[in-house]
């Protein structure tokens, strides 16, 4: 089961690296607009770009934290996954977009369940 947990955890990390890419490097791309439901005009706003880039760094750090936990400090994996779920729940309820929970935390929920059962 440890291998499955590690593989799924790495997939969660990849997801957060992808979010970081969209928010930090591809801020004005069509994909970023589609993923975040924003128009190209809004994505061109310098304030939005600054906020996205800042948020992208946080998402990248989550990815790094997950990778670090998988290979060096497995005891931190559960708290990180719980944090991801909590943030997704907050984002979902604060934005009114209930699908955020499943998009951002679905895989983290699976990993959390596996860690608790392990």
Image (cartoon, rainbow, N blue to C red):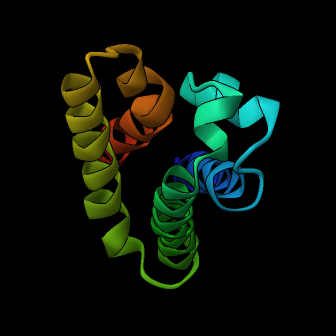
Residue at 33% from the left image edge and 72% from the top image edge: 76
Picture coordinates of residue 71 (x, y %)?
58, 78
Outermost residue toward the bottom?
A: 72
Query: In the shown orientation, is residue 62 left or right of residue 63?
Result: left
Query: In the shown orientation, is residue 100 left or right of residue 4?
Result: left
Q: Quadrant of residue 13?
A: bottom right
Query: In the shown orientation, is residue 53 left or right of residue 92?
Result: right
Picture coordinates of residue 117 (x, y %)?
29, 40
Residue sitting nearer the eye, 27 or 78 = 27
Q: Residue 17, can we see it? A: yes
| Vertical position of residue 68 compared to residue 24: above or below | below
Residue sitting nearer the eye, 71 or 62 = 62
Residue sitting nearer the eye, 21 or 4 = 21
Residue at 77% from the left image edge and 51% from the top image edge: 26
Q: Quadrant of residue 6?
A: bottom right
Residue at 80% from the left image edge and 39% from the top image edge: 29
Residue at 77% from the left image edge and 31% from the top image edge: 31
Counting labels gives 0
Residue sitting nearer the eye, 65 or 23 = 23
| Vertical position of residue 102 compared to residue 70: above or below | above
Q: Residue 117, can we see it? A: no
Query: In the shown orientation, is residue 104 left or right of residue 94?
Result: right
Q: Quadrant of residue 49?
A: bottom right
Picture coordinates of residue 10 (x, y %)?
63, 56
Picture coordinates of residue 86 (x, y %)?
22, 43
């Amino acid at each position: 089961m440890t291998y499955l947990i590690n593989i799924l955890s790495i997939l969660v990390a990849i997801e957060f690296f992808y979010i970081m890419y969209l928010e930090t490097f591809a801020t004005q791309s069509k994909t970023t607009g589609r993923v975040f439901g924003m128009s190209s005009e809004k994505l061109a706003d310098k304030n939005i770009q600054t906020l996205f880039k800042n948020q992208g760094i946080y998402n990248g750090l989550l990815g790094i934290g997950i990778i670090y936990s998988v290979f060096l400090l497995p005891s931190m994996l559960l708290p990180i996954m719980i944090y991801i779920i909590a943030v997704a729940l907050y984002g979902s309820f604060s934005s009114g977009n209930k699908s955020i929970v499943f998009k951002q935390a679905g895989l983290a929920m699976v990993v959390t369940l596996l860690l608790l059962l392990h």
